[in-house]
Amino acid sequence: VDLSAQIANMSVKNLFLNASGIHCQTEQELDELMNEPVSGAMVTKSMTPKSRFGNPLPRYYRLANGSINSMGLPNQGFDYYMDYLKNHDQKKPIIVSVAGMSKEEDLEMLHQLQDNDDYQGLTELNLSCPNVIGKPQMAYDFEAADDLLHEVFSFYKKPLGIKLPPYFDLVHFDMIAEVLNKYPLSHVNTINSVGNGLWIDTNSETVVLKPKGGFGGVGGSMVLPTALANVRGLRQRLNDDIKIIGTGGVTNGRDAFAHILCGAEMVSIGTQLYEEGLQTFERVTRELTDIMEAKGYTSLGDFRGKLKVIE
Ligand SMILES: C=Cc1c(C(=O)O)[nH]c(=O)[nH]c1=O
């Protein structure tokens, strides 16, 4: 099922999904997401060809208004997730997230997905992992991202989206959109965590994460302004047929409403889902429904992308 098909009969009910990395690494976590009644889709932890332990612990830390992580791409490996797809009926679309440690690994996994006749799913190429030691975030290198996508779309013909890091300059929105509009992407998922933040325990005068001297991706409510800007900036610049999954900073119905006003077709929840658990989906959906009812909206289309500016 590609995202646009999923969106065709979109309602509040199936608007939400987990952010990749959250509650989606093991078979048990994936089963719990699959059986969660409210979320409309789900996404796997970004996978690499072989399973990875990831970075040394501590590698996740909860902040007052968010989180910081340097997980280092821990995942069970490509074959594990392919087996999961084969052995479980899909009660909801599962987005397969792919994040090779190199361009070669990205291409290797995408070739396998393309050549697997049993696989008809929606794939998301993660170009934005900030925590693999020594590996830059590909999506900050516009030329390299263009080259990779050119090569990918020379053979990959199934629905494919990409996960982007946040950009912080309107010219960068222009530049990445110029690249992405050249390709038949099903969607863009924005934002990934805000890369290479740093948190300090001032009592011990020490960083809180072990990997990379404490540098890690920042998520949660404190990144909502950046997430909204990236959803809005890319919606204003991307071809209409490239849908946007809004990710970043969603803790309640009002945050989700804001993402949709900026143009998000679906909304994913990460830090809040990790901290509060799967009941987050039911709570945020209820809160969003209450807001829509109070405003007299009966469908997401009544307000999606209709953010007003001050004339
Ligand atoms: C796939 C690796 C990622 C990771 C990670 O595994 O460290 N953390 C993030 O916040 N975003 C990612 O994209």
Image (cartoon, rainbow, N blue to C red):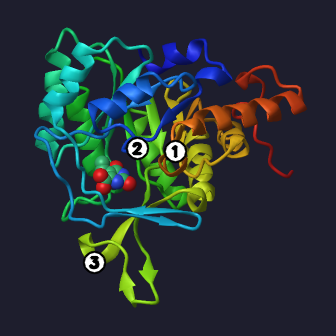
* Type of amino acid at the residue the image marks with label 1: Leu
Mark 1 crowdedness (10 Å alpha carbons): few <14, some 14-19, many ≥20: many
Which residue is at a point 23% across and 59% down the rendered structure image? 132
Residue at numbered disc 3: 213
Mark 2 packing: few (<14 Cα in 10 Å), some, or many (20+)? many
Q: Earlier in the sequence, mark 1 or mark 3?
A: 3
Residue 172 point in image, percent of width and height = 47, 56
Q: Name the residue tied to disc 1.
A: 273
Asked whether, in this view, residue 39 is left or right of residue 113, the answer is right
Can see residue 141? Answer: no
Q: Amino acid at mark 3?
A: Gly
Q: Position of residue 109 (x, y in %)?
A: 16, 31
Q: Can residue 89 be seen from the camera position used here?
A: yes
Does label 1 point to a residue whose CB lies under 8 Å from ligand 1? Answer: no
Instruction: Label 2: state its secondary structure.
Output: loop
Which x, y percent locates residue 187? 45, 30
Question: Which element carries disc 3, helix, strand or loop?
Answer: helix
Q: Quadrant of the N terminus?
A: top left
- The residue where tag 2 is placed is 22
Q: Is residue 110 left or right of residue 58?
A: left
- On residue 12, which mark appears? none
